[in-house]
Amino acid sequence: MGSVAYFPGQEPEQVPCDPPRRPQLEDGFTRINNDLFEAVCNNDAFPMTDRERRVVLIVIRLTYGWNRKSARITGGILEKLTGIHEDTAAKVLSGLIGKGVIKRHGGSRSPVSLNKNLSEWDLKAPQRVIPKQKSKRPDSGQNDLSESGQNDLPSKDRKDIPNPNGLGNVQSHRAAFEIFYNAGLPKKNRTKAEIAFKTQAKKHSDPTAFAQRLADNIASRLGTGELGFDAMHPSTYLNQQRWLDEVSERCPHAAIIDAWNTEMPAHIEKISPEDWTPDSKGFQALANAWEAFRTKPRASTGKPVFIEEQEGVEFYREVFRRLAQVDRVQREDAARWCRLSWAVKQGETVKIFKGEVA
């Protein structure tokens, strides 16, 4: 259809469009001590690379931004929030832990936090590396990299000369293996697992980065509550290259816990995200219910309860609001039975939402 023409002076009034909503504090904010914030910004006192500073800021966002002391942060999460590839981001995070800027509270898949003790930050300005000049010997013409004469021997004779880097390579692979072996899978058949890791690590230039990639993958999959994954042998994971499997969407446990702590009455038990681990009661129930609500269509509408993560969090928040209004829950003795591990069971969640819990 063509454009509509109007006589002069008869044009309809233009309805002004509302300006886009600007960020507001009520939408969320991150509170941090001024000294810590200034330390992160002060590149003279605490020199960091751009990648290091971006990772530090995200650690702050995922801890202080959620009003908690620490959080489990994987390479995949860092990639999503910083734009740095997950392998590189995981390596940067490990480097910051080694420099004392970030603290890890436990093994490789344990929560991390910003180290508030600035005196423990071991940051040094990057120094320019000047290439070593080659110098020739007047007699043999050998350079200073071949003082043993190894470079001048035929290849078939070099095998008898010990490789000065061999020990370092072995130690590097062993250290990388420990990162993988302590990532959360059952510690079974260590010898088989070490052989399998060595086989797979040979395909990658940096065994430490490869091991961290595996550790992040394991942490993500344990976090989703994937059935049976917590019992998988390390050698099976490696031989079947299970890190290449598609990881199902992670259930946002921390956001749902925050909704529970906010909406429920004060006398109802509050939950700490650090205690809500894959081994804790209720974790598996919530992970399974989240996946069912997100993927399985309802009979009444033919659509899932929710699809997007924020929709799901708001769904659970509404469930907790309705539960908090139940007379029985408002009594002091409700703390004995009204727990998050009970409320997130799929069947109980449906009853609460429908008002069938009285």
Image (cartoon, rainbow, N blue to C red):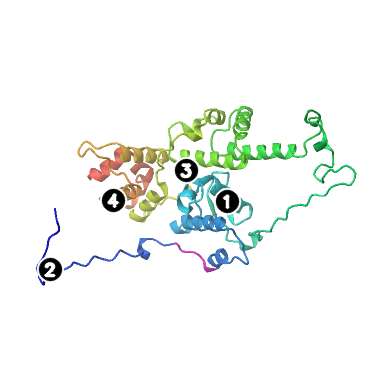
Q: Residue furthest right?
A: 139
In x, y percent, where is residue 282? 40, 40
Q: Amino acid at mark 4?
A: Glu
Q: Residues within 10 Å of mark 2 (few under 14, many from 20)?
A: few
The numbered mark, 4 or 1, whose residue comes first in the sequence reads 1
Q: Which mark is residue 318?
A: 4
Judging by the rendered image, the residue that carries numbered circle 2 is 11
Of badges 4 and 1, nearer the viewer stands 1
Q: Amino acid at mark 2?
A: Glu
The answer to whether residue 218 is left or right of residue 3 is right
Q: Which mark is residue 92?
A: 1
Using the rendered view, name the quadrant where residue 163 is placed.
Answer: top right
The CA span between labels 4 and 1 is 39 Å
Q: Nearer the viewer, residue 206 or 323?
A: 206
Q: Nearer the viewer, residue 91 or 187?
A: 91
Q: Main secondary structure of the magenta part?
A: loop
Using the rendered view, name the quadrant where residue 296 is placed.
Answer: top left
Q: Residues within 10 Å of mark 4 (few under 14, many from 20)?
A: some
The numbered mark, 3 or 2, whose residue comes first in the sequence reads 2
The CA span between labels 3 and 2 is 64 Å
Magenta segment boundaries in residue numbering: 30-34
Of badges 1 and 2, nearer the viewer stands 2
Q: Is residue 253 magenta?
A: no
The vertical placement of 102 against 278, above or below, is below
Q: Which mark is residue 277?
A: 3
